[in-house]
Image (cartoon, helix red, strand yellow):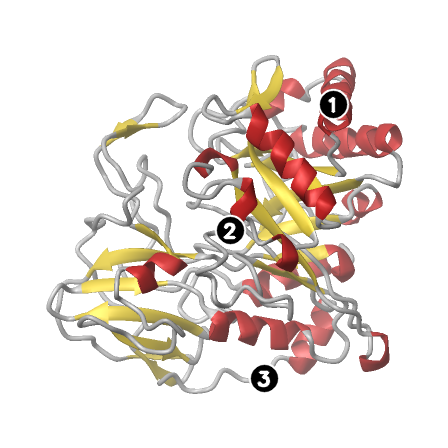
Amino acid sequence: MKLSTLWVSWASLLVGSPTTAKPPIVAQYWPAYASSSQPPSAFPWNQTDLAYYFVTTTTESGFKPGGAQSLADLKSFVAQAKAHNTKALFSIGGWEGSVYFSDLLATTVKRQKFAKQVQAFMTQYGFDGVDIDWEYPYSTGIGCNTDRPKDYKNLLNLLKILRTSLGSSKLITAAVSATGIVGADGNVMGDMSPYAQYVDYLNLMTVSFVFSRLPSCSPWSATTGPLSPLRTCNTDGSVTDAVMTWTSASFPAEKLLIGIPSYAISFTTNSSTLSTTTVNGGSSKLFQAWTGVVPKGDSSDITPSTNVCNYTTTAHSGHWQYWELIDEGFLSKNGTAGRGGYTRYFDQCTQTPFLFNPKKRHFLSYDDPQSAGAKAVRVALPGLIRCGVAKLTANSQRQAWARKRGVGGVQVAASVPPSSDLQKTDPPAPHAA
């Protein structure tokens, strides 16, 4: 998955009790399509336990690396992973790479064929596992995906075949919606425990709860907001909600990984002055009315662009890599203060930061060490099962918060306790600053 949905990436920390705690497992995606700016040699191997090779896209006959990806880079990625005692996995699908998933897995014969392709690719290049990033079962996703009511079952059957053919020595992970998997009736399944039999981890895509930046639709929200809020605060969900959704559907917490974005998304506000609103009993400046016109993001935000559905847009994505906020002079090197006309704020309710430049009316929402740390602390409370780190990575030398302390890397993944424990331990949201 690319920046628009990143989530994802992944790891785990056994926390069952203070005496059984283990070091966190850091997992990150390597953006193979951006190897010119970040070759395999620049990947933060010393901070990574699980490394995902991305993107591998689905086609009408199976899957293959993206057209701009070098096989030399692929081989180098695996070789360097092994040299650093890091598990190398490859990820199939993503936002633009899930068009044919439903067709490819529609029958037993097709699923077996797909599984053989996975095994052959894994053997040929020496990978240690595979990640199924289907966005999303029984959903049109980007807009032109094939889909059918039995997608949920076909995904489960594929995972079963993969586990049988690959054995227990290989890793199987899957990136899934934070709101759950949709069943044949069009509703989120009430019991998602069967998937746990075959996967090592599920990567919850816990980003972009407030809005969508899809060129084919309007933003979900008329205001600015957080990418990955810890709590639900005037948002369409939160990290805590996502975990409760999955654990209440009987999926084991120890196999859940939550995503924290390594990027920022930008807005142009209507006013040069931030207004204060009341959210969950406290004050907040995070939610501002904006123009609806997305400002240009970093140097990679080029228009016009055409997606796999042949939809062409001149709209910008508004994305910025976290480290580019520092390089461009918006944020101090340690990430604690705004620079160049920008002021850094931290919203206490959502536990997320944002930058604002009143002269430009430029608003940037993102996650940083403080917000990632808040999530890590939350999942490290007594009774929690696992915590991990992951997601699409940026330049590691500039990713100051990429540390193997449980909050390093580009997106954090963390497992959490059953919903009953969440309700017992989640403190009331403090007033926002």
Label 1 element class: helix
Measured as percent of width and height from the top left, residue 120 is found at 76, 21
In the rendering, which numbered label is found on residue 124?
1
Q: Earlier in the sequence, mark 3 or mark 1?
A: 1
* Amino acid type, callout 3: Pro
Image quadrant of residue 225? bottom left
Q: Which mark is residue 427?
A: 3
Local SS, label 3 = loop
- Dot 2 amino acid type: Thr
Assess whether mark 3 and mark 2 are in contact (beta carbons under 8 angstroms). no
Residue at 74%, 23% (x, y): give it: 124
Q: CA distance from mark 3 to mark 1?
A: 49 Å
Q: 197 or 263, which is in the foreground?
A: 263
Q: How dense is the environment of label 3, judged by Cα within 10 Å: few (below 14), some, or many (20 and up)?
A: few
Q: Where does the image place residue 293, in percent across and percent down from the top left?
A: 19, 49
Residues 115 and 262: in front is 262
Asked if residue 410 is positioned above or below residue 98 in the image, the reply reads below
Amino acid at circle 1? Gln
Give the mark nearer the N terminus: 2 vs 3. 2
